[in-house]
Image: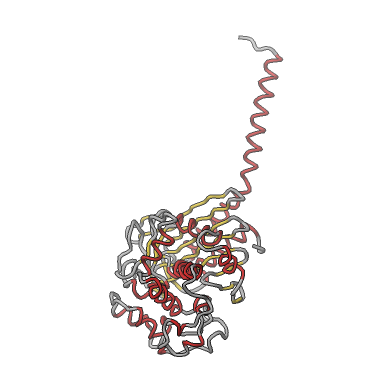
């Protein structure tokens, strides 16, 4: 069959147009792909150059059109099972955002004020007339952290890992060590503050902290794989393993080892990357608090440090708000930026010292890749 010259030229023109359009489409997607490749390399380098067994990262940037869930390394060392971003993990001190959000909801309901003194609820504690609820939330009370008493609580935990700790025991350990400085003078991270907040929530509501977090946050947001553990060593849901407790000792598995009561209001929750993304977007974007309290939380009462500011149960890095968490076997970062319309969730299934082992370092690398040093 013969093809006319005109028909042949038409075919070639249409083919060239298709190829040109395809190349144009590829160029449009190239910027995001290049960013994802860089983030992938950054995550892979953690596993390659450190003792961190596995890394899971979720980056959702609605402006750029990025939705990237990535896993590298292993979730189970003996069985060499690959990391999985759909599994449950312990979130450590990210729990504080849940606990203090419930407290702020109670403030919004008029059941207490951030200016109230600790003595209004627990007058028995030393200097309770000098400590405000706000100081408990933004870590300026200067009450000693019960996790850093001498001799170390960590020794007791290792000797008796399934010990069930009462809330009063934890608070008393903090007060027995005394104040680190005068209340309100400077900043000092203390888990004792958040245990006190948990006790205040239970005193005001008459319900357990677990009930309040579940009814006020977890159920309204339909977080079906998120929960708050009061006691016990079990980690609910499908999960990988978690390793190491500060020191690298091959084979040490702390996934279900310590009783959750030692963390309670300060660190006993669990979740998945996708559900933390949903929570972070609401935590920072609004919907859990009255507008006036939400504006205050994001704009006031911060104590500025070199690279991060800490406010009412929330940390700020650039335009990103959220929290980090660390506990035996797990380290977590959860941040969201309204300005960038971006959420970044990272977790490592290990707890080792050093910035190279800290997901906060990877978070910083991600935001530099996405936005440069000004984020």
Quadrant (top left, top right, bottom left, bottom right) of the N terminus: top right
* Location of residue 69 in the rendering, given as x and y in whole percent from the top left corner: 49, 52
* Location of residue 283 in the rendering, given as x and y in whole percent from the top left corner: 52, 62
Residue 325 visible (yes or no): no
- Quarter of the view holding residue 264: bottom left
* Location of residue 27 in the rendering, given as x and y in whole percent from the top left corner: 65, 42
* Location of residue 220 in the rendering, given as x and y in whole percent from the top left corner: 43, 56
- Quarter of the view holding residue 80: bottom left
- Examine the rendered structure and indicate whether residue 124 appears above or below residue 222: below
Asked if residue 144 lies left or right of residue 318, the reply is: left
Give the mark count: 0
> Which residue occupies the foreground of this view, 136 or 318?
136
- Examine the rendered structure and indicate whether residue 308 appears above or below residue 129: above
Residue 115 visible (yes or no): yes
- Which residue is at a point 56% across and 50% down the rendered structure image? 66
Outermost residue, front direction?
A: 110
- Which residue is at a point 64% across and 62% down the rendered structure image? 375
Asked if residue 166 lies left or right of residue 368, the reply is: left
> Which residue occupies the foreground of this view, 365 or 152?
152
- Which residue is at a point 67% across and 17% down the rendered structure image? 8
């Amino acid at each position: 069959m013969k093809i006319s010259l005109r028909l042949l030229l038409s075919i070639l023109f249409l083919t060239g147009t298709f190829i040109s359009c395809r190349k144009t489409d590829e160029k449009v997607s190239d910027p995001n792909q290049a960013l994802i490749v860089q983030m992938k390399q950054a995550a892979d380098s953690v596993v390659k150059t450190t003792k961190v067994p596995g890394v899971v990262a979720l980056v959702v940037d609605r402006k750029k059109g990025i939705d990237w869930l990535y896993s590298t390394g292993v979730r189970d060392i003996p069985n060499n099972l690959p990391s999985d971003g759909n599994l449950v993990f312990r979130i450590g001190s990210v729990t504080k955002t849940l606990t203090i959000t419930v407290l702020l909801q109670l403030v919004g309901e008029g059941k207490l004020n951030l200016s109230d003194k600790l003595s209004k609820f627990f007058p028995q504690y030393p200097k309770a007339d000098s400590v405000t609820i706000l100081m408990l939330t933004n870590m300026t009370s200067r009450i000693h952290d019960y996790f850093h008493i001498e001799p170390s609580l960590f020794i007791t935990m290792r000797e008796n890992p399934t010990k069930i700790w009462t809330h009063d025991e934890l608070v008393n350990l903090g007060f027995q060590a005394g104040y680190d400085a005068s209340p309100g003078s400077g900043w000092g991270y203390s888990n004792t503050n958040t245990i006190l907040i948990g006790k205040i929530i239970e005193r005001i509501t008459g319900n357990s902290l677990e009930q309040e977090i579940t009814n006020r946050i977890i159920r309204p947001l339909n977080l079906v794989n998120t929960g708050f553990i009061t006691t016990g060593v079990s980690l609910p849901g499908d999960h990988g393993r978690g390793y190491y407790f500060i020191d690298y000792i091959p084979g040490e598995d702390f996934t279900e080892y310590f009783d959750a009561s030692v963390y309670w209001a300060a660190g006993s929750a669990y979740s998945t990357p996708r559900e933390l993304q949903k929570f972070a977007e609401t935590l920072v974007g609004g919907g859990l608090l009255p507008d006036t309290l939400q504006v205050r939380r994001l704009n006031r009462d911060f104590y500025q440090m070199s690279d991060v500011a800490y406010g009412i149960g929330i940390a700020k890095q650039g335009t990103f708000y959220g929290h980090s968490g660390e506990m035996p076997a797990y380290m977590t970062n959860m941040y969201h930026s309204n300005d960038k319309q971006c959420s970044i969730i990272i977790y490592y299934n290990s707890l080792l010292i050093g910035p190279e082992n800290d997901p906060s370092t990877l978070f910083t690398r991600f935001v530099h890749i996405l936005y440069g040093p000004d984020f």
